[in-house]
Amino acid sequence: MKRVVYLDNSATTEPCQKAIQNINHALTDVWGNPSSLYDLGFNAQMLVDDTRKSVATMLKCREDEIYFMGSGTEANNTAITGAVMSRKKRGKRIVTTAIEHPSVLETIKRLEDDGFEVVYLKPQENGEISVDDLRAAINKDTIFVSIMLVNNETGAIQPVKAASDAIKAVSSPALLHCDGVQAFGKMPINLSELGVDLFTASGHKIHGPKGVGVLYIKKGITIKPLISGGGQEKNMRSGTESVPLIYGLKGAIESLGNINENIKKQKELWLYAKNSLLDTNLVVVNSYNDVLPYILNVSVEGYRSETLLHFLEAEGIYVSSGSACAKGEGSYVLKEMGFSRNRVDSALRISFSNNTTKEEIDALKTALISATQKLRRSVK
Amino acid sequence: MKEIILIKDGELALKGLNRRNFEDKMVATIRRRLKGLGKVSVERAQSTIYIKPVDDDFDFAEALDRMGRIFGIAAFSRACVCDKNIDDILSKAPEYLADTMKSIKTFKVEAKRADKAFPLKSPEICREVGGALLRAFPHLRVDVHNPDEVITVEVRDYAAYIRAGQIKGAGGLPVGTAGRAQVLISGGIDSPVAAYTMAKRGLVLNAIHFASPPYTSVRAEQKVRDLLSRVARYSGVIKLAIVPFTEIQEEIGKHCPEDYFTLIMRRMMMRIACRVSESDGCLGLITGESLGQVASQTLPAIAATDEVCTMPVLRPLIGMDKEEIIAISKKIDAFDISILPYEDCCTVFTPKHPHTKPKKGQCELAEEKLDIEPLIERAISGIEYSYIE
């Protein structure tokens, strides 16, 4: 059996025991339709509502502000399309960043095709959007702003609160959406203070199952759903609820432990990883020091990401590259940050979980050194 | 109504003494391709092959589909089976041909009477059937010179058959009548098209692919298998050899001048391909090269690679434009797979300024420091074989 050093937790995570137990329980014992009027249905509805309570407690918001969807992507689509459509009579401008996840960018691009004016804010060298740029872009004509909390490629934390302040400062009718998929469960989030109207999270990034997403809609905000039908989730997402997956999410949340302590530990590990890799003199670091310490983006200059990825794979070590293929489709996020073509083509994203150990980082370091000794440099 | 499929040989009809052998191969292929669709009988009479379903649940539509992908068949058609009397023919013809007749304006009837004992002569058959169709479809006219459709009535030993027009077949020569050749398959657009084109001329295909993990990925390999699957629908089973090429690429990178990388790499591939071909009973190689498409496909570059070959290299696309190649790729359903972005011949080793017109002897000089023989042997000993259907 090959060893597994899994360092791609921003892509997905290994489901935890409690999540799996919960899923099994729902599949085996509580399989009724939550909408049914008899006890079998009621019990299934309970599992969904229990999870809703867990999520609301964690995000410090009201239970009736939490809606379950099929994925983070679906939640983003619902939030963005719903919000823009509900405000379209009051303006034409959408403000977002050039480093959003495709589920945000693609949805906004479609709206752009329909005639909305979109401002794509570029990141600074540190991967963060500048607050001044935000303030300059948000005007009275702005009806929607979407800015992620943590960038999935670099880990850079974005000035979401500043966006909220900027909207209030110009009395803009804009709704503020925040894609929190990479932040959820990894840093303390207080939605009643963050100032957002819409917030997205996903289950499979925190050791929960794939197939469950969360959308927070602030009380008082009304948006139209994407999917019509039986009216589940207060009509925000029709379709029989995915009880096992939703209940699995509850198991994952319960297994998180103390988020503040986790993040302290992670910071240590992150610094250890960064320094170990810098020690090799083969690596440059693309993530600045104050990123969320679960993500570390580096470049092993002279070696193509995908080649390194496969080499590491053969050693049982799993990381992510920004490029989809050797045809040169590097990470657009890194490109926007202004990094050179070489640096982008050789970028690796290392993402930790609460279970990552120093030994695993050592294994990565050893393997990277070995890779540069064995592999041919890409001819540039 | 009972239906059969009628197949006419195309080029086959011209082959004289070879005819029997070609026909045998084609019938064997037809039988093989019809497997799994239900009980069926395949018979020959003169230059026609009859496919007669025995079961009612025979998958007729799928059979027709598959006939369209058998080389050697110029044209084929579906025909209605009638009893050998004019009444049955006249009662079935209008119903069977309804869809066709409604969509055309002019037609003519041709009759073939293999059974001379049949009471009506051919011209009489034509008149009767023509009359029945005119009565059933009043908008029609008979045009014996330039009809929209030709309705054929064939009276054979045990039954009569009515059909309208023909479906164009895949053409070419039956697979197996030209021997066996090995195609160098990359994941690109060209090599699958080259494979298909040569299978069309009767060659059984082996394939050889060069993989360089970790520079190339498992997905690239899967892409090659998927492409060969598309070709195999026409050519039959393909034996695939995957050659571990990483060491050779790295050695070339270490010991050869940069602008010769691609040329040397191709020469090594050809050397290996020739050896594998010989031991697998292939008489030639096939590549997807087209003149001038990329730097390594100039005449001098092709000469440099041919230099190391010990058997003929067939390049069916050599004179074709990219658009023509793409059209064939789309026809055989390979295009969407070909353009998936998983690189096979890795671009890690592509020189910035590849040599496009190597002079004689220059490649040998560039290869001097390579320990060629052991490299080839190690690569060949690591080959993994599989069969693609």
Image (cartoon, coloured by chain):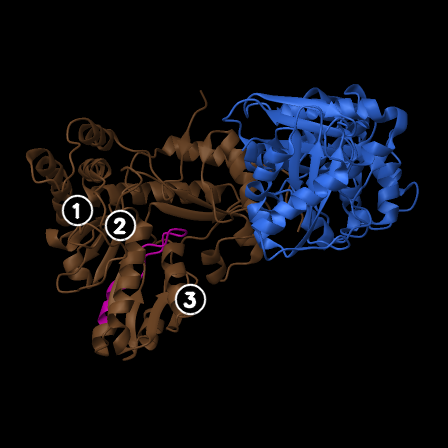
Chain colours: A brown, B blue
Q: Name the kind of residue labelled 1 in the image.
A: Val
Q: Is residue A158 magenta?
A: yes
Residue A334 visible in the shown view: yes
Mark 2: amino acid: Ala
Circle 2 residues within 10 Å: few <14, some 14–19, many ≥20: many
In the image: residue A54, left or right of residue B183? left
In the rendered image, which quarter is residue A254 located in?
top left
Q: Position of residue B50 (x, y in %)?
A: 68, 28
x and y percent of residue A162 in the render?
Answer: 26, 67
The segment highlighted magenta reads A149-165
In this picture, residue A174 sits left or right of residue B114: left
> Label 3, on which residue?
A122
Q: Position of residue B188 (x, y in %)?
A: 66, 44
The answer to which of B240 and A216 lies nearer the viewer is: B240
Chain ID, mark 2? A
Tell me the mark number nearer the camera, choosing from 1 and 3.
Answer: 1
Residue B244, by quadrant, is: top right
> Which quadrant of the figure has residue B156?
top right
**Residue depicted at x 21% and y 30%:** A27
Instruction: Look at the image and say whether residue A110 sits in the magenta stretch.
Output: no
Q: Earlier in the sequence, mark 1 or mark 2?
A: 1
Please give the chain letter of the residue carrying mark 3: A
Q: Which residue is mark 2?
A: A201
* Residues at marks 2 and 3, CA–CA distance in whole angstroms: 23 Å
Identify which amino acid the numbered label 3 is placed on: Lys
The answer to the question of whether label 1 and label 2 lie on touching residues, with beta carbons closer than 8 A, is: yes
Q: Secondary structure at mark 2?
A: strand
User: In terms of depth relative to the viewer, which is nearer, A43 or B242?
Assistant: A43
* Callout 2–callout 3 Cβ contact below 8 Å: no
Residue pushed farthest right? B360
Identify the disc placed on residue A55: 1
